[in-house]
Amino acid sequence: MQNKKKMLELAELANVHSKLVLNLLNTITACSHMKILPGRLYGQYGGPYVEVYSITPCLEERVRKILTAKINPYSVGLHVATIKKRGVTPSLDLAKYVTRKCKSSDYRHAMVSPKGEQAFLYGRDVFKNNIIETPEDEGLLIVLNTRKEPLGWGYLKREDGKELLIENIKDVGWYVRSGG
């Protein structure tokens, strides 16, 4: 008997996964979710993790037609996040979208110097001397360069209670390093 490989399947996002994504958005922004994600959330199921996409109503109608024709798209819409067993990782597309749709005062971000930008884009962490601006509390944030362009996602930490550090979660240099 031949083993059949399980195919990836695009479907409306399960409630448990929707809650994870909404918690992520509540953590990083004060913007309305409807402003950031203009459509329904869908998930790419069937693999070791779930890719989450926001699909506009206009695009959703087309996707439903494609799905009823037994054609399964690999990705569609705005890539929002990846859900794995250990948690939710926001996408680089989401960082770009949030910075375009929201005022900078409405989302968590840090600004780094040109030297900090270079380190971050090479997948390294950014230390205090290359951090220009940060929120007061630790946590997930969008890392910006001095031109306010999103570089990726970081996690603001305080080493020994006071020394600032931005831990690199994912940066736009990842595309080049991964061969994408």
Image (cartoon, rainbow, N blue to C red):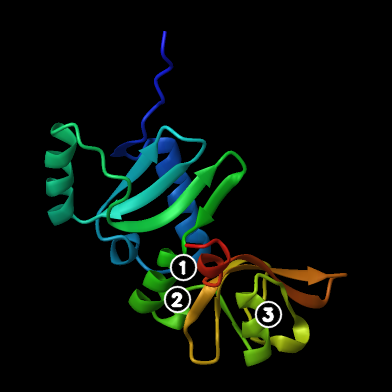
> Looking at the image, how many numbered discs can be counted on the residues?
3
Callout 2 environment at 10 Å: few (<14), some (14 to 19), or many (20+)?
Answer: some
The type of residue carrying mark 2 is Asp
The residue lying toward the viewer, choosing from 69 and 151, is 69
**Label 1 is placed on what type of residue?**
Thr
Check disc 1 and report the residue beneath it.
29
How far apart are the two marked residues, 3 and 2, measured between alpha carbons? 26 Å
Write down the quadrant of residue 165 in the picture. Answer: bottom right
Give yes or no for contact between labels 2 and 1 (Cβ–Cβ under 8 Å): yes
- Alpha-carbon neighbours of circle 3 within 10 Å: few (<14), some, or many (≥20)? some
Query: At x 40% / y 44%, what residue is drawn?
Result: 18
Image mark for residue 119? 3
Badge 1 element: loop
Which type of secondary structure does the marked residue at label 2 adopt?
helix
Q: What residue is drawn where x is 18% and y is 45%? A: 63
Rendered residue at 64%/83% (across/down): 118
